[in-house]
Every structure is written in structure tokens, then in C-alpha cells.
Amino acid sequence: MDAAPFFSEIADGPDDGAAFWVNADDGVRLRLAKWKTEGSGAGTVLMFPGRTEYIELQGRTARDFRAHGYSILTIDWRGHGLSDRLTEDPKTIHVNSYADYQNDVRAMVAAAKALDLPKPWFLFGNSMGACIGLRAAIEGLDVKACAFSAPMWRIKMSLIQSLIAIPVAWIACRVGKGHVYIPGHDERNYASYHPFEGNRITSDPDGYDYWVRQARAELSLQTGGSSMKWLLQSLIECRHLSKLPSPPLPCIAFWGDQDEIVDFEPIETRMAEWPDGSVVRIENAKHALVLEQPETRKTLIDKTHALFLAALSS
């Protein structure tokens, strides 16, 4: 695995982070990064980022997990960060199929094995990463437990939007417009232009500024809006996942009561039916719980760590 660029000065993570390149089975080049704890530690957290996110934005969360003794492995999904972009406009978040993200997961697992990252392994997925992670867990990802932050198991929409979204996105793809931005999206990165006031990401000014500083410092890491094909495939994947049983793993899911991006009902429904699952509703919190107020972040990490510990003794 060849070394890849890693902007540690903006990540605010542990000091020993390193990034490298791998190729997915279909040839897409991906950037991964690790923070490896000396010795066996507490195991390894496979960190699945959300839409528009990238490795450096996971730095503080990696630092929080490192404080509990974990090694961490994370990824720039295809179309994100420094991994291969998939459309002529490199700012577009695009995917041909959610099965492609599972190619990325397999590349990540192969890297974890090659790096001899200590077991047991655990999964922590955020937003879109929780959608990808749920599929991976259902298909047998080798982890002892999983935790999901603001899982994108259904995108929040109005009734009218939910009725027309799939047909409109399908038509756009059929007429060769699958690569164009969703209406209301463009090439701009949200954090680069939207002020803190009224943002949909976090209620914490410092957490928002963390992203803003990164967006200004390293433009190459940033993406803009999503494509019509991404929207279609996301809606289809969420619908498919809703019909599948949860995997036989301990799991905890978190959602903020001010989240304007993902719908809470599928989260509550799935976790109520998950045999070894629980759900935590966090008050006064928006979508990006990993960028939220310190007390919210502490709740997220501490409860996740407690679940991972309990999974080892079960």
C-alpha cells in the first residue's frame, strides 16, 4: 500500500495518523487512514463516514476512540475526499449503485487484515456510512458490535417529495441526467458558504468551525451536492434495507431531535425490533452528532464504548 496525503494539521486527531492508497475490486482508487494503538489495545473501530465527509473530518472522533484504547481505520468513500471522483464535475457526490460502496468496504477489510489491525473489530457508522454499514453488517462484516450515529435509513422529506422523488430521479437517469445535481444542490460545499446560524449540521459553534476551517484549508477534500443518480440509489437502498432483518450483533443507534436530514421513524422502528439493540434520542442535537456539543459527543462515545465492552463478555 502506497502512502497517500494526510493533512494531520487540520484533522486534530491522534499524532500518529497515516493515510494510504488501495484499489477496490472494480479499480476505483480509495484513500484510507489508520491510527494504530500499540499492542492489542481495545481492538479496532472501523469508522464509516457520512455523505460529504472525508478522513480528516474524523480526526476528533478518532481521538475520542483512541482515549479508550482503540485503533481506528477510516476511509474516503468513492466520490469523496481524495478517493477517485466519479463524474466530470469532481464536486458531485455520485454513485452508480450502493453495491459499489460494498466494494469499498471489502477493500477496507482487506487493508485492515494487511495492516494486522488488532481484533476484535467494531463498526461505527455515521449517516450515509450507517446505511453502508448496516448493509455490510447484514452481509456478515466481521465485527463484534456496531454503533450508528444519525443513520441514514430514510432521508427526511415532505410527503409530496417522498411520493415523487424516486420517479423523478429515475426519469432523470433514464434521459442521461443522472450525473446532474439534485435541485437545490450545486458545486459548493455546505460548510464553505453557509453561516453557522441556521445550519443543519450542528448546534455547536466550535464543531461547525472545525469543518469550516478544513473546508477553507484543503479545497481538494471537499464535495458539493449529490447527483440524481446518488439520490435514486440512496432511496432504493433505504427501501431495500427496511425489508431486511437486523444482523445478530449488539447495536446502538443515536439520533438528534433536531435532525433535518434523516428520518427518525426507521431508526426507532428497527432498533425496537433489533434483538440486542437500543436507541438513544439526544435532545437539542442536529444531524452531525460527532460535531455536536461536548456533552453530546461524550454521550455518543461513552455509550458506544460501553456497548463494545459488553459485546466482548456476551
Image (cartoon, grey):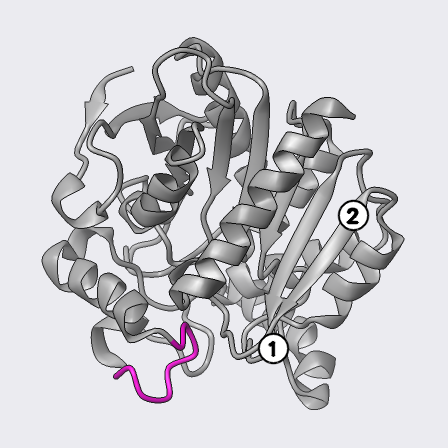
Q: Residue at x 32, y 39 (%)?
A: 83
Residue where numbered disc 1 is placed: 257
Q: CA distance from mark 1 to mark 2?
A: 19 Å
Identified by mark 1, the residue type is Asp
Quarter of the image with the C terminus in it: top right
Q: Which mark is residue 277?
A: 2
Residue 84, percent across and down? 32, 40
Give the left or right position of residue 159, taking residue 57 as reference. Answer: right
Circle 1 SS class: loop
Looking at the picture, tell me which residue is in the foreground, 180 or 148.
Answer: 148
Residue 66, percent across and down? 38, 34
Give the left or right position of residue 167, taking residue 37 as reference. Answer: right
Q: Residue at x 16, y 49 (%)?
A: 10
Identified by mark 2, the residue type is Gly
Quarter of the image with the N terminus in it: top left
Q: What span is in magenta?
A: 195-203
Dominant secondary structure of the residues highlighted in magenta in the image: loop
The mark that comes first in sequence, 1 or 2, is 1
- In the displayed structure, 97 sits above or below 109; it is below
Q: Is residue 305 visible?
A: yes
- In the displayed structure, 110 sits above or below 129; it is above
